[in-house]
Image (tube, rainbow, N blue to C red):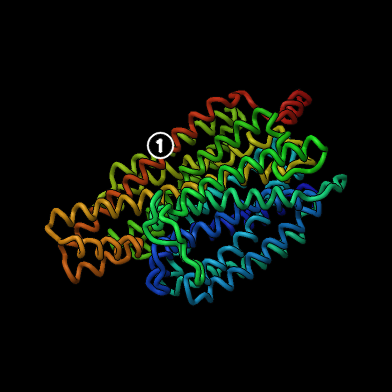
């Protein structure tokens, strides 16, 4: 096989590796109602099953991006896939919510090894127009897998068990390891022998961890005054002030310390976890800001839709997957569009078109969601949303990394991946809080209108919210009127979450206005000039 064919064959297995970790981040959404019923986890644990993966993923991307540059990008990819596979076995055999969350933490560690390695391998392997095509394949894989995951998860959950949603990772992991060793060449920055920024890594984990903890647990422990005391082992939070303000204070202090420490190391000529010098590049700086905000709006809505489809509309996991398949179809159509017009339209323009489509799709979903909405009203907007995701994801990655030197590709890709994952974590935390908080408030108001006493209202609201809506079908047998109120309230909350996501996407669109609309890969321009 020629070198060129080997590179493209290697891209196939790199893309499958990306698909593995993206599918796993979305496949759980459809399986969640079954997990709630089987393991009896609460709505807070529902968020943590997602967040534990995403949070660890985001916190360690920079560390593993730097290590991949140092010790080998292919090696890091293989180790990451192996860790991810072993963690999947633990997740598939979990007998409690806490064990499942712990398994997701390990999956996050493996995923954090994989994602920056795939990006830096593409950045180091391809040049010019080929690099743009490779990034398009990489991005389209992410966009498509966001929806293929729910379909696969729905099929496995409906006909087998939610545990197979994790077990399916094992054969794919074996395929990736074999294919990567066969077709992907090793790549590393052998000239840099400086030490790893351990303190910077700890500060970054503390910053992101405390922020997401505060956003998720605020409704449980109280945003200011203690609503329910935090208990760890035999120790109980002793203050009337909630631990949440303290968590946010830690976020600010640790974040400031991380920046000051990193800039100090950079001035001393030592390696830093975050590529501070790369932020002097306008495309890198502006692209990362846009990526964070866009991801905040993109993936948060994926948490609420499967819960609404199954618990309110009564769809099975497989039916939910088929509905969400429209998103995947839209994303793959976008990849064809990008391939046809990518050389005629600047990447930033493609990103803006994609974001505009996402805004229309998500806002459209919010406008049609109700307790009696049929799938036909949702599918067109999911298609438009998927089309936008497919356009924006790949091209935004290319914009961020286009001026990054190859020797810094791991750190650069780790930085932009971290921006995306922090955005995703914040999106799940913020939009999840919007969903569950507004569902509880709306249901309480409707039950009050029905004349239920406060004690009964509290019990019903807690049952619906803590079960992430899974208690709604059971209410039908006790009181159809109460069940209808719960469906309407959960639908209203889903609509508020969708409109909130659309608002963040609008901010992301505005952030792209600061990016150059004429950015084209320098090597591609040189190749075109040489051809003339």
Furthest residue in direction front, as rendered:
239
Q: Position of residue 174 (x, y in %)?
A: 67, 68
Secondary structure of residue under mark 1: helix
Q: Classify residue 308 as left or right of residue 388.
A: left
Q: Residue at x 36, y 57 (%)?
A: 227
Q: Nearer the viewer, residue 267 or 417?
A: 267
The residue under label 1 is 503
Q: Quadrant of the C terminus?
A: top right
Q: Classify residue 316 as left or right of residue 278.
A: left
Q: Position of residue 403 (x, y in %)?
A: 71, 32
The image quadrant that residue 527 belongs to is: top right
Whether residue 156 can be seen here: yes
The image quadrant that residue 436 belongs to is: bottom left
Q: Nearer the viewer, residue 60 or 173?
A: 60
Q: Residue at x 41, y 57 (%)?
A: 221
Q: Position of residue 482 (x, y in %)?
A: 18, 62
Q: Classify residue 109 as left or right of residue 96.
A: right
Q: Residue at x 46, y 42 (%)?
A: 297
Q: Quadrant of the N terminus?
A: bottom right
Q: Classify residue 290 as left or right of residue 73.
A: left
């Amino acid at each position: 096989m020629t070198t060129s064919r080997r590179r493209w064959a290697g891209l196939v297995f790199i893309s499958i590796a990306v698909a593995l970790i993206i599918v796993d981040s979305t496949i759980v959404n459809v399986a969640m109602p079954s997990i709630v019923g089987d393991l009896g986890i609460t709505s807070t644990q529902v968020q943590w099953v997602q967040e534990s993966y995403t949070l660890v993923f985001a916190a360690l991307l920079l560390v593993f991006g730097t290590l991949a540059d140092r010790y080998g990008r292919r090696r890091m990819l293989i180790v990451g896939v192996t860790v991810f596979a072993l963690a999947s076995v633990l997740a598939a055999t979990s007998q409690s919510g806490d064990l499942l969350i712990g398994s997701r933490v390990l999956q996050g560690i493996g995923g954090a090894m994989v994602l920056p390695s795939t990006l830096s391998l593409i950045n180091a392997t391809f040049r010019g127009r080929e690099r743009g095509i490779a990034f398009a394949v990489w991005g389209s894989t992410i966009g498509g897998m966001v929806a293929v995951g729910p379909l696969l998860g729905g099929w496995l959950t409906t006909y087998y068990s939610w545990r197979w949603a994790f077990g399916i990772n094992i054969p794919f992991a074996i395929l990736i390891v074999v294919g990567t060793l066969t077709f992907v060449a090793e790549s590393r920055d052998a000239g840099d022998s400086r030490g790893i920024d351990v303190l910077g890594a700890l500060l970054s984990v503390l910053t992101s961890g405390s922020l997401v903890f505060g956003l998720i647990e605020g409704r449980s422990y109280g945003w200011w005054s203690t609503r329910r005391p935090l208990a760890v082992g035999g120790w109980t939070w002793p203050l009337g002030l909630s631990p949440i303000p303290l968590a946010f204070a830690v976020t600010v202090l640790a974040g400031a310390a991380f920046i000051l420490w990193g800039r100090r190391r950079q001035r001393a000529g030592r390696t830093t976890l975050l590529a501070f010098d790369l932020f002097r590049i306008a495309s890198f700086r502006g692209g990362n800001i846009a990526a964070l905000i866009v991801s905040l709006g993109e993936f948060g809505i994926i948490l609420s839709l499967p819960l609404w489809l199954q618990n309110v509309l009564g769809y099975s996991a497989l039916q939910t997957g088929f509905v969400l398949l429209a998103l995947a179809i839209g994303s793959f159509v976008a990849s064809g569009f990008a391939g046809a017009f990518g050389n005629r339209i600047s990447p930033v323009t493609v990103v803006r078109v994609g974001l505009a489509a996402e805004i229309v799709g998500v806002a459209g979903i919010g406008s049609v969601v109700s307790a009696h909405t049929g799938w036909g009203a949702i599918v067109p907007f999911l298609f438009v949303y998927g089309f936008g995701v497919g356009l924006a994801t790949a091209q935004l990655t290319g914009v961020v990394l286009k001026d990054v030197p190859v020797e810094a590709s791991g750190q650069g890709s780790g930085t932009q991946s971290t921006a995306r994952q922090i955005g995703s974590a914040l999106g799940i935390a913020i939009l999840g809080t919007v969903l569950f908080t507004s569902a509880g408030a709306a249901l309480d108001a409707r039950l009050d209108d029905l004349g239920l006493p406060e004690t009964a209202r509290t019990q019903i609201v807690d049952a619906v919210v803590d079960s992430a809506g899974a208690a709604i079908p059971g209410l039908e047998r006790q009181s159809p009127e109460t069940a209808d109120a719960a469906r309407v309230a959960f639908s209203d909350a889903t609509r508020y979450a969708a409109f909130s996501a659309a608002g963040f996407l609008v901010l992301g669109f505005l952030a792209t206005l600061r990016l150059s609309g004429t950015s084209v890969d320098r090597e591609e321009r040189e190749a075109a000039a040489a051809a003339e």
